[in-house]
């Protein structure tokens, strides 16, 4: 979605930011590095990391941005669970766009990639 919204708004981004590259996370995304650390804290479930990321995000961007980021993360969780429970298929992962994203983010490095459509 980051790539699609960046194309819509003609904003340069570096998609590698979602892989933990802090310098990439800041390209075209205000408070990108702080938001990336917050998202990683949520995804990993490591409480100390989440507490530190939350504090950094508040210091850099303010409480309103933290609340918005938490709301966006919660909404994505909700949407994914609803789609999974209803059996909604994933986008065409075998297409050129999916292949490009997998290569750019080096997603094949994950063990679970063996269970994915290539």
Image (cartoon, helix red, strand yellow):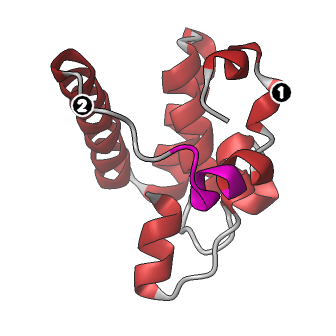
Q: Which mark is residue 88?
A: 2
Counting from the top left corner in percent of width and height, residue 86 is at: 16, 21
Vertical placement of 98 versus 96: above or below? above
Vertical placement of 117 versus 51: above or below? below
Position of residue 98 in the picture relative to residue 5 (left or right): right
Residue under the image location 29 percent in, 49 percent down: 68
- Range drawn in magenta: 93-100
Precedes in sequence: disc 2 or disc 1:
2
Label 2 or label 1, whichever lies nearer to me, is 2
Vertical placement of 28 versus 70: above or below? below
Instruction: Say if mark 2 contacts mark 1, CB within 8 Å.
Output: no
Counting from the top left corner in percent of width and height, residue 83 is at: 23, 28
Is label 2 in a helix, a strand or a loop?
Answer: loop
Residue under the image location 48 percent in, 24 percent down: 42
Residue 97 covered by magenta stretch: yes
For label 1, count other residues whose C-alpha is less than 10 Å away and answer few (under 14), some (14-19) or many (20+): few
Position of residue 59 in the picture relative to residue 77 (left or right): right
Residue under the image location 59 percent in, 11 percent down: 46
Q: Nearer the viewer, residue 81 or 73?
A: 81
**Residue 77, visible in the rendered structure:** yes
Q: Nearer the viewer, residue 10 or 60?
A: 10
Q: Give the quarter of the figure containing the N terminus.
A: bottom left
**Which residue was labeled with disc 1?**
109
């Amino acid at each position: 979605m980051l790539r699609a919204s960046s194309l819509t708004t003609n904003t340069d981004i570096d998609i590698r930011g979602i892989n933990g590259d802090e310098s990439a996370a800041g390209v075209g995304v205000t408070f990108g590095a702080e938001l990336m650390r917050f998202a990683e804290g949520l995804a990993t479930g490591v409480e100390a990391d989440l507490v530190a990321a939350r504090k950094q995000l508040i210091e850099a961007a303010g409480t309103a941005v933290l609340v918005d980021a938490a709301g966006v993360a919660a909404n994505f969780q909700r949407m994914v669970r609803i789609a999974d429970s209803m059996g909604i298929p994933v986008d065409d992962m075998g297409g050129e766009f999916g292949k490009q994203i997998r290569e750019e983010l080096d997603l094949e490095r994950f063990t679970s990639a063996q269970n994915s459509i290539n």
